[in-house]
Amino acid sequence: LALEQSPDTVIQQDQSVNLSCSKKQSSSTFMCWYKLPLGKDSRLILVASVYQGSKADVEKDFKDRFKNSEIQGDGMTLLIEHAFVDDSGTYYCAESETQWLSY
């Protein structure tokens, strides 16, 4: 399995950015975005997810300014509108052939 993401991007506060993720030679049916905040004690935070053929879901803490696309063709995009300093971090996309459930 191989994923290609947008190149590293630096933006100013209040700018918008569109991150893209595409899968190569994959039959994954579930894709998601994680954020790794800045700082040594940070952990991955689920931002958005989408199951093939269904509506994309953005986690509660990100719903105001983050928009995730459905899986289109071989990938998906994540739009961050009017970025804040708190949005800083590294964003990763991931894929799976099944959807994870968390409680």
Image (tube, helix red, strand yellow):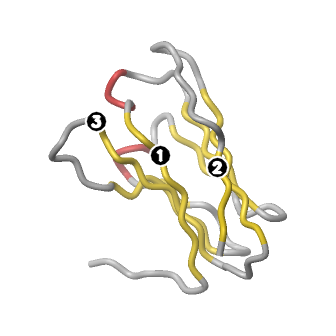
Kind of element beneath mark 2: strand
Kind of element beneath mark 3: loop
Vertical placement of 52 versus 38: above or below? below
Q: Position of residue 10 (x, y in %)?
A: 52, 22
Query: Earlier along the polypeptide chain: callout 1 or callout 3?
Result: 3
Quarter of the figure with residue 93:
bottom right
Q: Position of residue 27 (x, y in %)?
A: 73, 82
Vertical placement of 44 versus 52: above or below? above
Query: Earlier along the polypeptide chain: callout 2 or callout 1?
Result: 2
Gap between marks 2 and 1 measured at Cα? 9 Å
- Give the residue pinned by disc 3: 38
Image point (59%, 68%), residue name: 31
- Residue found farthest to the left: 41
- Give the residue pinned by disc 1: 91
Amino acid type shown at disc 1: Tyr
Gap between marks 1 and 3 measured at Cα? 11 Å
Q: Which mark is residue 5?
A: 2
- Residues at marks 2 and 1 touching, judged by CB atoms closer than 8 Å: yes
Work out which quarter of the rendered image holds the C terminus and state it.
bottom left
Image point (61%, 38%), residue name: 79
Kind of element beneath mark 1: strand
Image point (32%, 77%), residue name: 102
Crowding at mark 3 (Cα within 10 Å: few <14, some 14-19, many 20+): few
Image point (43%, 53%), residue name: 47
Q: Position of residue 13 (x, y in %)?
A: 45, 14
Gap between marks 2 and 3 measured at Cα? 19 Å
